[in-house]
Image (cartoon, rainbow, N blue to C red):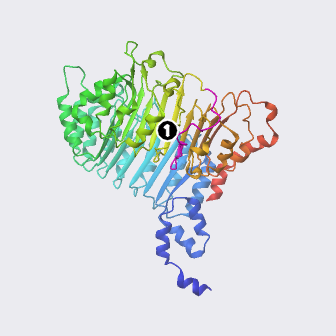
Amino acid sequence: MEEEMAETALPLDVVQIVLGYLTDSRSVAAARQACSSWRQAAAAAPCAVRVVLPSGVANMRDKLTLLLRLMPGLSGLQANVAAGSDTAYTSTCLQDILAFQNLRQLELAFADSQELATPDVSQLASLRGLTALRLSNVSLGAAADSGPLSALQNLQELSLVHHSKVSALMVGDSHLQVLGKLAGLKSLVLQGRMCSATDEGLLALSGLAGLSSLSISWVPWQSQITQPAALQLLASLTQLKSLHLGGAELLLPSTPYHPGEQMRAVLAAKSNELQEFKLQFNCCGTGVEKALVSLGEVRRKLTGLQWSYAKLSGPSSVNLLASCTNLRSLKLRLWYQDYNLTPFDFNLLDLSQLAQLRTLVIDKRPPFQQQLPAQQSAISMPITTGMLTKLSRCWPHLEKLQLGFARSDFGHAAPLEGLAGFSQLRSLSVHCYDQAWEAARNSSAGWEAPPRLPLLQHLQLKHCALDGIGLEDVITAPGELRSLQLVEVVGLSPRDIALMPCLASLLRLTLIAAKEDAWLGLAPLRLLSKLPELRHLDWVVSERALPARSKATDLQALLQFGKLQDWDKSGL
């Protein structure tokens, strides 16, 4: 029997190559159990795996130790770090990662913001073989010495992202000057607030002659970077094919008497070379019309536009957006509108010319507000079933749709009605403000078609209604969904809750019951505790839920969620 297996078995070098494509540590662990030869091949396979590092230094170290024992030849590590990490946790984590001597790609995404100290930077610099380093939710303070990073001369991709709206990604010019010495970089992402950065620091990046992708952002009032320096940097990067520029207000003319001809000339020349060209405006109240008029014909070359706090001036703003016919991504979050703004309709059909659109985000509510300010009512964004049906034919590639509108904008239409044509949607978010939604209809008989979305991975519904349909009419591939957030959604029924245990890939679940849903208690947690991938759970029952409905078995189910990270370790 062994001779027969030997004749039909794959060569071990082929097995090792195949196992190198695995991204799940549990799959590698299963392969090791096949036989001793496969165990040896799995140990040497250059896998790139995704893991979750649990909170607590001891738990984290146990997991990394086990990972090292199973896959000492690991070439790539993508780790999501659970909440609760601190300076000691980060330092210990980086120290243990040094044991993976074949590591070529490292990605760490921290749930809590982490400020890297000089010892942390030195440990990262010890990974001399790295070709890609991606750190999310980290910062480099003024006291940190980033100089050791210049030793990473094999590095081709570097990403430093900080999600905070208050603290900085980096302070001063010294960190930028170090990054400018990484001559082998082809891709650089610096997303966050760069405080006290000056032209000297920015122009240090001109040394990255081989850079083909640059994503960089700053807040104009927190840095001393000038428009000429930004344009000089862009002109010097001759190999650039992808550009994402945040803080794009810097490119706009300071007064109407300076039309920005130099800016247009540089951007026009650069846009002819770029395959991807995105601008993001971060300042409060940046006018859509002012920005697009200033850009001139360059706007027709843009593939992405984003306003974090936009002001509209009327239908002309919508017409200018429609003229950006190369857009693949449009994100428009509104700031407080002018009280004297003449009321007008923002008709999504006016954007039907954007045939390449893959991402659309429009939100009427200014940040930090629970409700819509009175002046937002001047902008009506009517949604009808027929409109969405037509737009599904105009935007055949749309993958992400996020709408935050007033209840009145939907009229008599259900919030999910008319979405059936968007067959490529991966992410859907609908948020209704102000008025409470009425009770759901008893059936979906009036619907043209249930919004069956076979590729959906993320679904978020806030303060709206299912209107007679169930989650199963939206989520037609339950095993693909990774995030589900339902906040005060009217019309949830027991069959919707019964679908949740089928969401085998779910990482995040948020359910905040509507006040009317007094039937919804803790009982479903008995089933949800079995979800293998669940990492984040918010479950808030209605105020009207009777305490007498809670049973001891419901409370015991809560204890099962504490085992999720331990289960993940046993999965290794």
Residue 570, compared with residue 222, is above or below; it is below
Name the main secondary structure of what is drawn in magenta: loop
Seen at 19% across and 40% down, the residue is 269
Quadrant of residue 353 within the rendered picture: top left
Q: Nearer the viewer, residue 394 or 132?
A: 394
* Residue at which label 1 appears: 418
Name the spot of residue 177 as percent of width and height, x first: 31, 40
Q: Residue placed farthest to the top in the image?
A: 340
Q: Provide the secondary structure element on which disc 1 rests.
A: loop
How many other residues sit within 10 Å of disc 1, few (<14), some (14-19) or many (≥20)? many
Quadrant of the drawing holding the C terminus: bottom right
First to last magenta residue range: 438-458
Name the spot of residue 29 as percent of width and height, x first: 59, 64
Seen at 55% across and 60% down, the residue is 68
Q: Does the magenta stretch include residue 184?
A: no
Quadrant of residue 316 within the rendered picture: top left
Residue 381, compared with residue 378, is above or below; it is below
Seen at 31% across and 47% down, the residue is 213
Quadrant of the drawing holding the N terminus: bottom right
Q: Which of 453 and 35 is in front in this view?
A: 453
Say what amino acid the circle numbered 1 marks.
Gly
Q: Does the magenta stretch include residue 443?
A: yes
Q: Specify whether residue 132 is in view.
A: yes
Q: In this view, does 5 lie to the left or right of 355?
A: right
Name the spot of residue 238 as percent of width and height, x first: 21, 46
Q: Specify whether residue 117 is in view.
A: no
